Amino acid sequence: MAQDATRPARIGILTVSDRASAGVYEDASGPAIRAALDEMLATPFEALARIVPDGVESVRDAIVALVDAEGCDLVLTTGGTGPAPRDLTPEATQSACEKLLPGFGELMRAKSLERVPTAILSRQTAGIRGRALVINLPGKPSSIRTTLLAVMPAVPYCLDLVGAARIETRPEVVDAFRPRPA
């Protein structure tokens, strides 16, 4: 059963950072996601921004809360996808999701490799929790737009398939794919 088509999509923006969550520095990645969404999406949406420290439990619990309690259709995480000991966002995403969609991470890494050889160190993934799509984006603000542009053509149809709110992209920025009705 699809969600209420009259309400705007709810999009969780989850920054994962020990230092940003402690106030050591200002979060730049969450606002970079918001700016990219404002550029790419034609339909209205409600953004719910959160900042949590690194760690499986903190990130998993935030994803679960954004989807189950806040009704998010899409959750975009930023940070915690590298090889450092505290980078555990992919593990938290796997723990929160019923189905994994590794193609998202594969495409984001391939796109990032066009710019920087260290993209192979990223462990981004995506998954489905209930009627929501969760995507791990990189932590570097300059990489967020690049990777989101790469995967966004598939996001609206994925949301349709899981029964989330419908979103439309701006075709001059992102040409989203949806199959033609038979």
Image: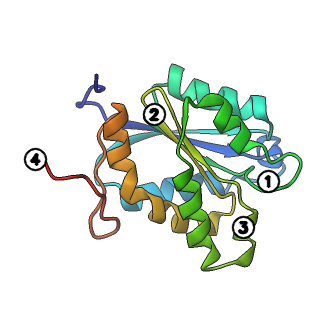
Is disc 1 surrounded by few (<14), some (14 to 19) or many (20+) residues within 10 Å?
few
Sequence-wise first label, 2 or 1: 1
| Residue 25: x %, y % from top left | 79, 53
Distance CA(mark 4)–CA(mark 3): 40 Å
Q: Which mark is residue 101?
A: none
Sequence-wise first label, 3 or 2: 3
Distance CA(mark 1)–CA(mark 4): 52 Å
| Residue 73: x %, y % from top left | 43, 35
Which residue is depicted at the point 82% across and 44% down? Answer: 18
Nearer the observer, 53 or 31: 53
**Residue kind at label 3, given as amino acid type:** Ile
Mark 1 = which residue? 25
Mark 3 = which residue? 120
Q: Do the residues under discs 3 and 2 have CB atoms within 8 angstroms?
A: no
**Residue kind at label 1, given as amino acid type:** Tyr
Q: In the figure, is residue 4 to the left or right of 134?
A: left
| Residue 52: x %, y % from top left | 73, 37
Distance CA(mark 3)–CA(mark 2): 27 Å
Is disc 4 surrounded by few (<14), some (14 to 19) or many (20+) residues within 10 Å?
few
Distance CA(mark 1)–CA(mark 3): 27 Å
Sequence-wise first label, 1 or 4: 1
Mark 4 = which residue? 182
Location of the N terminus (image quadrant): top left
Local SS, label 2: strand
Pair 1/3: label in front: 3
Mark 2 = which residue? 132
